[in-house]
Image (cartoon, rainbow, N blue to C red):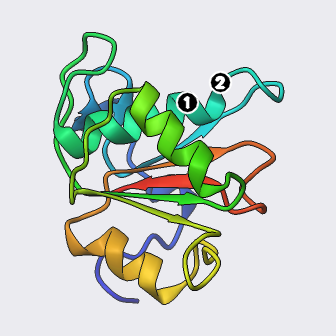
Amino acid sequence: MPAGTISDVSALPPVWDMNATVEWLVDDMIPRASVNLISAESGTGKTWLAYAIAGAVAHGATFIGRPVAQTPVLYIDGENPLYVVKRNLTDLRIARNDALRVWGGWNAEEPPGPDDDRITAFATAAKPAADLGLAGRIRAGRRAVLD
């Protein structure tokens, strides 16, 4: 058996004896390299919240008073038309920033799914930070990959 292989369940170390540290994307709220779910009824602000987080991360700005690690963001929006996205970015005061990319249905190609090689390449280029999936909308293609 290769080194490090667990041949028996009893060989698993107790989790209480293991060190665990958290590197935060949004301090005490969103850990780096995590998958997070935003879930609520339709029309309650999930998109606004996701764009607000994406903008804060792309700019390295605070989010609801919490420090944020600046990192590139790819927001995949398979639901909203361009005019709605631009209105939201303006209303949220998210300034133009090359660290924030939005891929929507207005582009030459529809937004791909999360297993697309281009998404994987983006997410691994600067080490993954977090993935915000919107409940009930992941199949529709609306999610923010915060890299």
Residue 22 visible in the picture: no
Above-or-below relation of 124 to 51? below
Tell me what residue is drawn at x 24 percent, y 16 percent. 66
Label pair 1/2, CB-CB below 8 angstroms:
yes
Picture coordinates of residue 141, whole percent (x, y): 68, 62
Coordinates of residue 76 in the picture (x, y in percent): 54, 61
> Crowding near pointer 1: few (<14 within 10 Å), some, many (20+)?
some
Name the side, left or right, on which 29 lies relative to 135: left
SS for callout 2 = loop
Tell me if residue 143 can be seen: yes
- Check residue 45 in the rendering and tell me which mark sits there, or answer none: 2
Q: CA distance from mark 1 to mark 2?
A: 5 Å
Q: Nearer the viewer, residue 26 or 105?
A: 105
Question: Is 140 placed above or below 59 here?
Answer: below
- Residue at 58 percent of width and 56 percent of height: 82
Three-letter code for the amino acid on which mark 2 is drawn: Gly
Q: In this rendering, is residue 115 above or below 127?
A: below
Give the image location of residue 107, x and y in percent. Answer: 55, 76
In which quadrant will I find the C terminus?
bottom left
**Residue 138's quadrant in the figure?**
bottom right
Question: 116 and 47: which one is in front?
Answer: 47
Q: Which quadrant would the N terminus be assigned to in this image?
A: bottom left
Query: Relative to residue 100, is residue 145 drawn left or right?
Result: right
Tag 1: amino acid: Trp
Q: Quadrant of residue 2?
A: bottom left
The residue that disc 1 covers is 48
Secondary structure type for disc 1: helix
Residue at 47% x, 88% y is: 117
